[in-house]
Image (tube, rainbow, N blue to C red):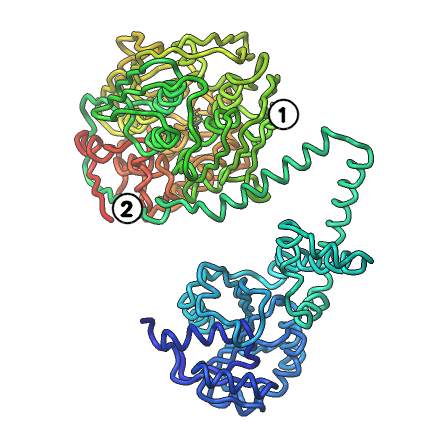
């Protein structure tokens, strides 16, 4: 049972919404006393008989006396008159809320009564729940369960009032959202008021026909579903249409414009455009279903973890083998799954991102053994063997999974939806959806910014296209090439700068021909992949933290074994060398189609600030957070330009790094596409550079690991918050860095 929240609750108006909320209050004993005031004596009698109230009033001023919560549950247009009636009987501690569908006019009504200084307890609200049935008998204790309640607190609203109302609605099983008044009215005009208006209008149109009886008699599901809400309370809707007039008229304008487009397409028998419009709307509706039905399960269960790095003298030494490459691990599962035969993978990265890809393919019916000690066996199902997943595919933190799978799933016969965690849910997905649509895919992203969830309607026939990538992105390139495997004809992309080419290399390893001619990459659809052995090299992006750690620590000596040195990934080596690091690449060899080498780096000289070469940016795209730490320890200024992509990674890595560096005493200036860092290093001087402090990683693994390295040159303790995402790419980061000499602790 929930705690008792109120002494006396007074409902003014007691219809469907008011009586449902009273049922919740009674069932959970949330108030000592509940009263109601209505014009209908019968309603009060019924409410008393149902045990929902202890007393009924016809005079609102009497009803609200001594109440600590007043709920205005009456048509919105009556608000001003009612507030005038009860104003002098409310105390300063009384919470006053309402349940109306429009909020601007409720606030206007309150201003007309109180002037600008509205009572602190006044918090307008709107439960998005209802029914076409009305009256005290229609009320239900679970009317709000699983629904949203929007509160629109004003600048004058007190926190205590918002908090208590939130508890009340949560007790009713609702999810409480706070929004400003204008936004509320605009959103509701489209999602509720316009559909009601259309339903009333349709029924009216049919009712006025001479043959209306026949129409109503024979009308089947479509009419019944669409017109259900036209049976709603006409008085209430009359008020709503006037109360939210401005926003509703705007929505009606939009409706008229869309309707006339549709009308013209039919008039002109424009089959292709009509199919496009209907298909788009159909996909959007399915997407909406998915969004409602598939809440990611794992998202809320994550623990928040933090790292503490203690100051003091540090060494940083040893030979290490960092985990497998994330990009290669993802692709080994994806390609193994659609190949003919059984693929064996060694060195697989058992981090959460690659595991999200692995789980997605299990969800699509692929049998996968492992991972165990980096070994995975994938029983390929061939190009046409993937099966519809039962629910949404959860991609966790992984942009690579979502963008590459967007391509693959667009070509399947089944519908699918992909969701992600909070960070992934903010990342741009239109960059891949757009070219896929040009190929004929039905793919839908969410919101104005085109973010996840992503919904895909299967069964489309894809055509090869040529696409000029507007940004240097291996993920987008790969997503298009992967869709191209199933497309008719040739698919080709040109990239503005070379980006990692693991997709091209691994497709070739699976026996699929991919052409690379200068910056143009192409393949022919309709082929097949043949299973193979994949040896995943160590991830240079993970090795980068050790390289930077060694470069900034006196007498350090670190060797990283068997690191992938694919030339599209070695920007970090080039940049560190240009900064003067003592770095050697030894024992170069090939493993599983990728070049690997041992990298040795020693702390023998102070780094120097440079203008980082722009052509290296895509080749070091994931390593900049670590390189910024190196730059802070360098002598002189480091400038990075041409790296706007950093702003749309797991976090806005330019801003988040700049914030953290400033916290630790580094002078830096973030720019639109890079950063300027004033290095604090002095030649031959290895004393601390950073002050220590509290760093917010924004749950970005590479931010967390980069600032951990700063601990090697800090005078104070560093606390890094939100480090649990380190497990996405480098699960044993703390163990390995501790072995090298970093004083790092983990706590939850
Ligand atoms: C990746 C490509 C890069 C990189 C990401 C992995 C890949 O992203 O940042 O960590 O595996 O293709 P973009 O292609 O979006 O730059």
Which quadrant of the view contains residue 544? top left
Q: Is residue 363 left or right of residue 144?
A: left
User: How far apart in space, not on screen, are marks 2 and 1 (Cα)?
Assistant: 42 Å
Q: Is residue 666 left or right of residue 122?
A: left
Residue 252 x %, y %: 74, 54
Q: Is residue 579 visible?
A: no
Mark 2: secondary structure: loop
Mark 1: secondary structure: helix
Within 10 Å of disc 2 (Cα), the crowding (few <14, some 14-19, many 20+) is some
Residue 644 x %, y %: 52, 32
Ligand 1's quadrant: top left
Residue drawn where x is 65% and y is 67% of the image: 104
Q: Nearer the viewer, residue 285 or 80?
A: 285
Residue 322 x %, y %: 25, 24
Q: State which quarter of the image contains the N terminus.
A: bottom left
The reply to whether the residue tagged 2 has its Cβ within 8 angstroms of ligand 1 is no
Residue drawn where x is 18% and y is 36% of the image: 313
Classify 202 as above or below 471: below
Residue drawn where x is 56% and y is 81% of the image: 12
Residue drawn where x is 73% and y is 61% of the image: 246
- Tag 2 residue: 305
Q: Is residue 270 left or right of residue 137?
A: right
Residue 399 x %, y %: 44, 32
The reply to whether the residue tagged 1 has its Cβ within 8 angstroms of ligand 1 is no
Q: Nearer the viewer, residue 418 or 715?
A: 418
Which quadrant of the view contains residue 5? bottom left
Q: Earlier in the sequence, mark 2 or mark 1?
A: 2
Classify 746 as above or below 564: below
- Tag 1 residue: 438
Within 10 Å of disc 1 (Cα), the crowding (few <14, some 14-19, many 20+) is some
Classify 537 as above or below 23: above
């Amino acid at each position: 049972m929930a705690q008792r929240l109120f002494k006396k609750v007074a409902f003014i108006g007691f219809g469907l919404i008011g009586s449902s909320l009273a049922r919740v209050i009674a069932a959970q004993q949330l108030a000592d006393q509940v009263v109601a005031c209505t014009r209908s004596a019968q309603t009060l009698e019924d409410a008393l008989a149902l045990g929902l109230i202890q007393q009924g009033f016809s005079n609102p001023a009497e009803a609200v006396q001594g109440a600590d919560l007043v709920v205005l549950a009456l048509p919105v247009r009556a608000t001003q008159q009612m507030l005038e009636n009860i104003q002098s009987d409310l105390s300063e501690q009384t919470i006053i809320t309402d349940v109306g569908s429009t909020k601007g006019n409720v606030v206007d009504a309150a201003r007309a009564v109180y002037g600008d200084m509205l009572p602190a307890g006044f918090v307008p609200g709107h439960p998005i729940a209802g029914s076409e049935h009305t009256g005290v008998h229609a009320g239900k204790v679970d009317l709000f369960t699983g629904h949203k309640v929007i509160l629109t607190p004003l600048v004058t609203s007190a926190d205590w009032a918002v908090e208590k109302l939130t508890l009340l609605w949560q007790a009713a099983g609702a999810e409480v959202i706070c929004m400003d008044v204008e936004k509320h009215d605009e959103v509701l005009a489209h999602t509720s008021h316009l559909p009601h208006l259309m339903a009333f209008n349709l029924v009216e149109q049919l009712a006025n026909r001479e043959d209306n009886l026949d129409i109503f008699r024979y009308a089947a599901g479509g009419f019944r579903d669409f017109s259900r809400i036209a049976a709603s309370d006409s008085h209430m809707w009359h008020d709503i249409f006037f109360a939210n007039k401005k926003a509703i008229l705007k929505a009606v304008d939009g409706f008229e414009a869309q309707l006339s487009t549709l009308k013209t397409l039919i008039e002109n028998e424009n089959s292709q455009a009509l199919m496009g419009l209907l298909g788009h709307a159909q996909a959007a509706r399915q997407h909406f279903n998915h969004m409602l039905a598939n809440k990611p399960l794992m998202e809320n269960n994550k623990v928040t973890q933090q790292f503490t790095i203690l100051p003091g003298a540090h060494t940083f030494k040893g030979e290490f083998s960092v985990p497998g490459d994330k990009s290669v691990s993802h692709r080994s599962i994806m390609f193994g799954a659609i190949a003919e035969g059984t693929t064996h993978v060694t060195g697989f990265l058992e981090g959460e991102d690659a595991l999200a890809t692995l789980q997605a393919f299990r969800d699509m019916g692929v049998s996968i053994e492992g991972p165990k000690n980096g070994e995975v066996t994938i029983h390929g199902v061939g190009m046409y063997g993937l099966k519809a997943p039962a629910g949404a595919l959860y991609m966790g933190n992984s942009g690579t999974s979502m963008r590459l799978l967007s391509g693959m799933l667009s070509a399947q016969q089944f519908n699918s939806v992909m969701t992600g965690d909070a960070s992934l849910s903010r990342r741009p997905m239109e960059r891949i959806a757009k070219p896929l649509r040009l190929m004929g895919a039905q793919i839908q992203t969410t919101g104005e910014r085109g973010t996840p969830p992503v919904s895909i309607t299967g069964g489309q026939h894809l055509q090869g296209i040529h696409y000029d990538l507007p940004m240097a992105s291996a993920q987008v390139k790969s997503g298009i090439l992967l869709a191209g495997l199933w497309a008719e004809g040739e698919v080709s992309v040109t990239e503005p700068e070379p980006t990692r080419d693991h997709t091209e290399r691994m497709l070739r390893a699976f026996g699929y021909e991919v052409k690379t001619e200068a910056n143009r990459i192409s393949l022919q659809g309709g082929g097949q992949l043949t299973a193979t052995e994949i040896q995943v090299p160590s991830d240079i992006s993970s090795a980068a933290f050790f390289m930077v750690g060694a470069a900034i620590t006196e007498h350090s000596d670190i060797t990283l074994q068997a690191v992938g040195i694919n030339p599209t990934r070695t920007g970090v080596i080039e940049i560190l060398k240009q900064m003067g690091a003592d770095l050697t690449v030894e024992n170069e060899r090939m493993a599983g189609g990728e070049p690997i080498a041992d990298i040795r780096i020693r702390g023998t000289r102070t780094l120097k600030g440079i203008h980082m070469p722009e052509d290296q940016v895509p080749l070091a795209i994931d390593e900049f957070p670590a390189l910024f730490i190196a730059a802070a320890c360098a002598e002189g200024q480091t400038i990075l330009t041409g790296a706007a992509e950093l702003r749309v990674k797991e976090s806005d890595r330019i801003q988040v790094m700049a914030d953290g560096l400033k916290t630790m005493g580094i002078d830096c200036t973030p720019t639109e596409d890079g950063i300027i860092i004033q290095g604090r290093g002095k030649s031959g001087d290895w004393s601390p550079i950073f002050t220590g402090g509290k760093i917010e990683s924004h749950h970005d693994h590479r931010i967390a690991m980069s600032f951990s390295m700063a601990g090697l040159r800090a005078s104070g303790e560093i606390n890094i918050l939100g480090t649990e995402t380190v497990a996405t790419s480098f699960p044993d980061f703390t163990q390995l860095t501790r072995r090298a000499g970093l004083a790092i602790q983990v706590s939850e």
